[in-house]
Image (spheres, grey):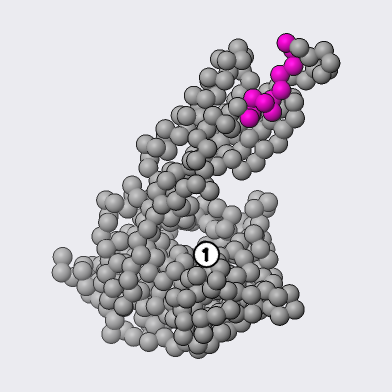
């Protein structure tokens, strides 16, 4: 199978190139430096023998591994993103290799006393005896999602070198700007031309996800009226007090800090206010479509009630849908999840199927016509200095990709 040394070398080659994206930029890619890795990847894909390697004006990369069987097999795709999160710096990443992890504290940075400890990050205990790649404590690692890229490239290379493994046409796609919610935006689904695909962008080994939140944002504008406080009786309207009424009328326990699993929430994430005007910013999340719609209605109803109570339009609430649960698009083609699950079992992994409490590129792609569940890439503690990835998980993810292509070809033959 794929060697540890090769995977480590490839991953570090990607991780040490800064590709932080920027939500305040309007260009695609959002930062020029993402081209550094994008161009390198396009070259590498040609070097390993991929066909139709293309990189468009927005740095989206696509490539093909042609079928090696003489019967019809669905075209499947594998997708990951090469940008890293703007939440934490991705400049001068200096990966550390921890061989044969002993199960205790890992000192990431002696001078700054930064320690990666299983007392706090219990998942570390899953990887005792394995090889971990960590940061030096001053940057993120970028395993999200350079681990995914590394696994896809390694799997393609492996399939090219092992033609005895039978597969149909495989398409791969690498995108910029996923971390700022724009990875799928300019993804040309038609050009990609796959029947379905998988994003390699999950965390722990075994993760397989095809459910995510339905998501909306809400901006609640409360209008007040400033009058000299000494002469304000019956005249002043304090927008902050009305805003407080609004906030307190929503269920206090349906918030992120009180929910888990399939429980949805209202999340107030910003308030700016004075007497004249207060603006509340919410996000609304729910896996269930009906509950999601009901949550939006609750906000509108509350707005109307307060407006009636004050006898004028004191509140304007604007709700915008952001993305939807991909489940609706995946269930009609649930065999694509079954294949991934079976592939994991065949390479000795216990599948962990669970609902994502967030969104993925895959959910947007699914609504653009490309059903796209998400598979683990292996990393943990994304978007910060404690990010790490076990090399063994990356190797397993590579095996899962190869196995999915093989199972797709064999099941097509039986049919
Ligand atoms: Zn990611």
Can residue 52 be seen?
Answer: no
Q: State the image coordinates of residue 143 (x, y, percent, origin top left).
A: 54, 71
Count of marks placed on residues: 1
Q: State the image coordinates of residue 122 (x, y, percent, origin top left).
A: 50, 70
Q: Is residue 171 above or below residue 154?
A: above
> Foreground residue, 35 or 91?
91
Q: On the rendered structure, is 374 left or right of 100? A: left
Q: Is residue 97 above or below residue 149?
A: below
User: Residue 184: within the magenta?
Assistant: no
Q: Which residue is mark 1?
A: 81
Look at 32% across and 71% down and name the residue there: 350
User: Residue 237: within the magenta?
Assistant: yes
Look at 29% across and 61% down and name the residue there: 336
> Foreground residue, 357 or 395?
357
Q: On the rendered structure, is 5 left or right of 16? A: left
Q: Which residues are magenta?
A: 234-244
Q: State the image coordinates of residue 407 (x, y, percent, origin top left).
A: 26, 72
Q: State the image coordinates of residue 230 (x, y, percent, origin top left).
A: 84, 16
Which residue is farthest front?
119
Q: Which quadrant: the C terminus?
A: bottom left
Can residue 312 be seen?
Answer: yes
Q: On the rendered structure, is 223 left or right of 129? A: right
Query: Is the CB of mark 1 within 8 Å of ligand 1?
Result: yes
Which quarter of the picture shows residue 225? Answer: top right
Which residue is farthest left?
414
């Amino acid at each position: 199978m794929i060697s540890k040394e090769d995977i480590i070398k490839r991953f570090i080659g990607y991780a040490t190139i800064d590709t932080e994206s920027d939500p305040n930029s309007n260009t695609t890619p959002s930062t020029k430096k993402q081209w550094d890795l994008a161009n390198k990847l396009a070259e590498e894909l040609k070097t390993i023998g991929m066909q139709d390697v293309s990189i468009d004006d927005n740095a989206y990369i696509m490539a093909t591994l042609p079928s090696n069987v003489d019967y019809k097999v669905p075209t499947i795709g594998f997708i990951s993103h090469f940008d890293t999160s703007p939440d934490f710096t991705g400049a001068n990443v200096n990966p550390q290799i921890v061989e044969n992890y002993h199960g205790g504290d890992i000192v990431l940075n002696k001078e700054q006393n930064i320690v990666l400890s299983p007392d706090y990050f219990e998942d570390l205990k899953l990887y005792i005896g394995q090889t971990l790649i960590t940061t030096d404590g001053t940057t993120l690692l970028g395993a999200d999602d350079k681990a995914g890229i590394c696994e896809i490239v390694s799997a393609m290379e492996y399939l090219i070198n092992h033609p005895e493994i039978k597969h149909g046409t495989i398409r791969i796609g690498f995108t910029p700007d996923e971390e700022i919610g724009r990875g799928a935006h300019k993804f040309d689904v038609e050009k990609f031309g796959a029947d379905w695909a998988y994003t390699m962008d999950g965390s722990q080994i075994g993760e397989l996800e095809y459910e995510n939140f339905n998501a909306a944002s809400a901006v609640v504008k409360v209008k007040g009226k400033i009058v000299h406080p000494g002469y304000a009786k019956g005249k002043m309207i304090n927008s902050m007090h009305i805003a407080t009424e609004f906030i307190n009328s929503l269920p206090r326990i349906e918030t992120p800090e009180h929910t888990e699993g399939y429980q949805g929430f209202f999340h107030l994430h910003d308030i700016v206010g004075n007497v004249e005007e207060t603006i509340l910013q919410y996000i609304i999340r729910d896996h269930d479509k009906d509950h999601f719609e009901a949550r939006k209605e609750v906000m509108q109803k509350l707005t109307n009630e307060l407006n009636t109570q004050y006898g004028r339009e004191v509140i304007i609430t604007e709700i915008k849908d952001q993305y939807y649960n991909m489940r609706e698009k995946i269930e009609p083609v649930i065999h694509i999840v079954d294949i991934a699950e079976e592939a994991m079992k065949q390479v000795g992994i216990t599948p962990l199927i669970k609902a994502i409490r967030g969104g993925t590129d895959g959910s947007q792609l699914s609504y653009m016509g490309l059903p796209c569940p998400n598979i683990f890439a292996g990393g943990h503690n994304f978007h910060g200095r404690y990010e790490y990835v076990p090399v063994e998980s990356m190797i397993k993810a590579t095996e899962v990709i190869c196995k999915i292509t093989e199972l797709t070809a064999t099941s097509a033959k039986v049919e």
